[in-house]
Image (spheres, rainbow, N blue to C red):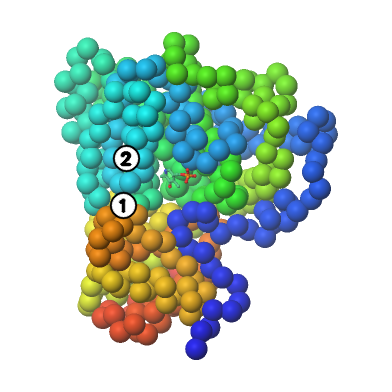
Amino acid sequence: MSLAQGRHYLAIPGPSVIPDRVLQAMQRPAPNIYAGELPDMMPGICADLKSIARTDGQCAIYIANGHGAWEAALSNVASRGDKVLILATGRFGHGWAEIAQAMHLDVEVISFGKRAPVDAARVADRLAADTKHEIKAVLTVQTDTSTSIRNEIKPLRDALDGADHPALLMVDCIACLACDRFEMDAWGADVMVTACQKGLMTPPGLSFVFFNERADAARETADLVTRYWDWRPRAWPEHFYQFFGGTAATHHVYGLRAALDMIAEEGLEHVWDRHAQIARAVWAAFERWGADGPLEMNVADPAMRSHAVTALRIGAPHGTRLRDWLSSETGLTLGIGLGMADPASPDWHGFFRLGHMGHVNAHMILGALGAIDAGLKALEIPHGRGALEAAAEVCAGR
Ligand SMILES: *Cc1c(COP(=O)(O)O)cnc(C)c1O
């Protein structure tokens, strides 16, 4: 019998769970876009976004998803034919590379595979070999949502500085801003892109490009910049409409305001710590299940795992069977495996992901893990014992 009635839990890695407070803030008639509350809210929103990005730099807002932010960021710093180096640890690194390619950049990808993080020593070697400084920017993804690998950003800044290389460091934090610790200025990122529908808990539709003075200096000569994607009027608007390059994303602004208030009330450090502890509870459960049977976390070393999402390997066809069963029988929807196998191949059915980003607390995650435990049993997928106890121990702070 299906036990799926009740509140459905969408535990895919984005869009993440939207807090009622965010939804309620958006439930209103169209606001005036010329004066009053909406324009008045913008300085505070920009300040709060910068404090979450840990930067004193600038923030440009786009009515776009993460793909839009990828393109916006590149258009402001690059010219046709410029060389960019992309450090890929999953599908999203390659996705950014495809965007760059389509913008007629000279794209070089170093792929570190699907199970290992970026190796800063290899990057340092590549930069040292670029004696003519042809590489204009180094692009990477902090948390690649497809693999759940979390990359260290500071060592990449050190590699650039060590090679005395002027390339910009550009980081995709779309999956993990306000989940995994990120320090834009302290770690030396020149550009950071993110979007609102993951750690920022707001329906998809807004994305953000943060940039520092070095990146803005590159904007001076970038020939890919177009009127709409130009970050300058958005970051330094003389009129309210310039924040959005046209009509404001009215309701999203209210939703985002509520989400930023929630993050501020909890405190960013606490938000990071909560994600870390919830991630450890998730890993403890998967560790136990995996002790017997086919289930295995994609990233072996916990130090290299994101706190926002966990990618799993369970062997075909168990991934799809488990996702389907959980969704129809328990009201829990897990993420598909992304970029792990060709969608046309039977192997594609051997993966899944659990998103644990944003508006997620202990009872939600313990409930999700309990449902997965039921699924493994119902489908007779071999698994080790003690997973839920192990997760509860972590949630209990032991
Ligand atoms: C979700 C995601 C994207 C793509 O964002 P869209 O809003 O779907 O365009 C890019 N990079 C990472 C790391 C992501 O998690």
The disc label shown at residue 125, or none: none
Q: Is mark 2 within 8 Å of ligand 1?
A: no
Q: Residue at x 30, y 73 (%)?
A: 318
User: Within the displayed image, which quadrant is ligand 1 positioned in?
Assistant: top left
Q: What label sits on residue 94 in the rendered view?
A: 2
Residue 319 place in picture, x, y as percent: 33, 69
> Which residue is rendered at x = 52% and y = 54% of the image?
15
Q: Position of residue 245 (x, y in %)?
A: 64, 26
- SS category of the residue bearing label 1: loop
Q: Position of residue 327 (x, y in %)?
A: 47, 73
Query: Is residue 212 in view from this perspective?
Result: yes
The residue to which callout 1 is attached is 339
Q: Are marks 1 and 2 in contact (CB under 8 Å)?
A: yes
Amino acid type, label 1: Gly
Decide which of 267, 354 is in the foreground and name it: 354
- In the rendered image, the residue lying farthest to the bottom is 1
Query: Residue 181: percent from the left, percent from the top?
Result: 44, 45
Q: Disc 2 marks which amino acid?
A: His
Q: Quadrant of residue 390?
A: bottom left
In whole angstroms, how far apart are the C-alphas of marks 1 and 2?
A: 10 Å
Residue 269 appears in the rendering: no
